[in-house]
Amino acid sequence: MNKRYSAQKMMIENALKELDHPTATEVYEYVRESYPNISLGTVYRNLGIMAEAGEILRIPSGQAPDRFDINIHEHLHVLCAECGQVFDAEGHQLEDLLGKIDKLLEESTGVHIEDRSMLFQGVCSQCRKQ
């Protein structure tokens, strides 16, 4: 791996740590403040490589641009349909519920669940106030 790629990847990782479930464009704008020569294509390419390698999560957001998450531990995402903000949902009760869902799916289909991708949508409290 060359030094340029490593530096770019490190800046993208830092952006993911600072931003909350950003889009590729938001990562690009953040990194560009300290590294003006980076291209949007480079950000997209690196995010894709990192997601494919399991280093980050890609969160498909329907019609909106995908979002990315540095937190790769199992948790759920809730998308506000109004403002597009993504919220993390985690906890022991959710883990128990997901385990039960996995078991029900396995019993009804015969497929052993190894991974899941779920995105819940609603309207956040801030948008409901408006």
Image: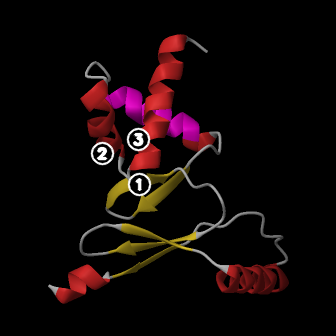
Instruction: Tell me whether circle 2 and circle 1 mark residues in contact (CB < 8 Å).
Output: no
Q: Quadrant of residue 31?
A: top left
Q: Which callout, 2 or 1, points to the residue nearer the camera?
A: 2
In terms of sequence position, does the residue under pointer 3 or pointer 1 come before the other? Answer: 3
Q: In this rendering, would 16 be left or right of 6?
A: left
- Residue linked to disc 3: 15
Give the SS element for disc 2.
Answer: helix
Residue 43 within the segment the image draws in magenta? yes
Instruction: Tell me whether circle 3 and circle 2 mark residues in contact (CB < 8 Å).
Output: yes
Which stretch appears magenta?
A: 39-50
- Say above or below: 45 vs 82: above
Type of amino acid at the residue the image marks with label 1: Arg
Q: Main secondary structure of the magenta part?
A: helix
How busy is the neighbourhood of tag 3: few (under 14 within 10 Å), some, or many (20 plus)? some
Whole-percent x and y of residue 128?
A: 23, 87
Residue 108 within the segment the image draws in magenta? no
Type of amino acid at the residue the image marks with label 3: Ala
Instruction: Tell me whether circle 3 and circle 1 mark residues in contact (CB < 8 Å).
Output: no
- Residue linked to disc 1: 67
What colour scheme governs how the chains and residues are painted in the rendered image of this protein?
Answer: secondary structure
**Residue drawn where x is 35% and y is 41% of the image:** 27
Q: Which mark is residue 12?
A: none
Whole-percent x and y of residue 46?
A: 48, 32
**Residue drawn where x is 24% and y is 75% of the image:** 82
- Disc 3 from disc 2: Cα separation: 9 Å
